[in-house]
Amino acid sequence: MKRILMSVALTGLPFAVMAEITEQYDSLSELIHEHGDYDEGNGTFELYSEDPLAFRLSKPAIQGEPAEVTYYENWRAAIYGVYNTFAHTSLDAVTMTAMPLWFESFTKRDSSRLMDEHAIMLEMGRDDALDALRAVTGMETLADIKMMTDFGYQWSPAFLDIYYEDRDPGLDAFIQELRLYCVEICE
């Protein structure tokens, strides 16, 4: 069940403490369902195990898409899986697999297959995720990755600077830190 911790505002805690509070979910499945970015029904989310937490996220990849686009979208799926989990749940560790879901075309959705040759598998705890974040951005807490907007919690500007390849320090710098947590070679 989603818990928005607004009662903290009534306790008189300082604003700095309240700023680190994000909406929390009791499980990864609830988080995925509520955010709607991935879904079991269309093959973009698969829960392998709840304890220990292991799951797959897949961004669609269309035939003819440049390899660079598939590469970066897949890494963003891996980052989304790890960092959204830690931002919105109390879970302490995650094994996250990102694997593009290939389609012949948008109109031929029955032609899909998982591109296991591009799989990324990360095993990370909260401290690992924070260490990788600090190494690239200097952020001090996992709460720094999200901020409240008119559209709910979104990635913070500082996090977006490592979520996209055309920013500084950029996604490539973040990928280099995350490779330390790859279970096998990350493509």
Image (cartoon, helix red, strand yellow):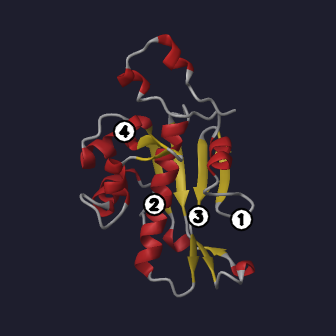
* Residue position marked by numbered label 1 in the rendering: 42
Residue 129 image point, x, y percent: 39, 42
C-alpha gap between disc 2 and disc 4: 18 Å
Disc 4 crowd rating (10 Å Cα; few below 14, some 14-19, many 20+) is some
Disc 1 crowd rating (10 Å Cα; few below 14, some 14-19, many 20+) is few
Residue drawn at x 67%, y 44% as measured from the top left = 29
* Residue position marked by numbered label 4 in the rendering: 144
Residue 4 image point, x, y percent: 59, 29
Relative to 162, residue 49 above or below = above
Q: Is residue 110 left or right of residue 31?
A: right
Q: Which mark is residue 17?
A: none
Q: Amino acid at mark 2?
A: Arg
* Residue position marked by numbered label 2 in the rendering: 76
Disc 2 crowd rating (10 Å Cα; few below 14, some 14-19, many 20+) is many
Extreme residue in the bottom direction: 64
C-alpha gap between disc 1 and disc 2: 19 Å
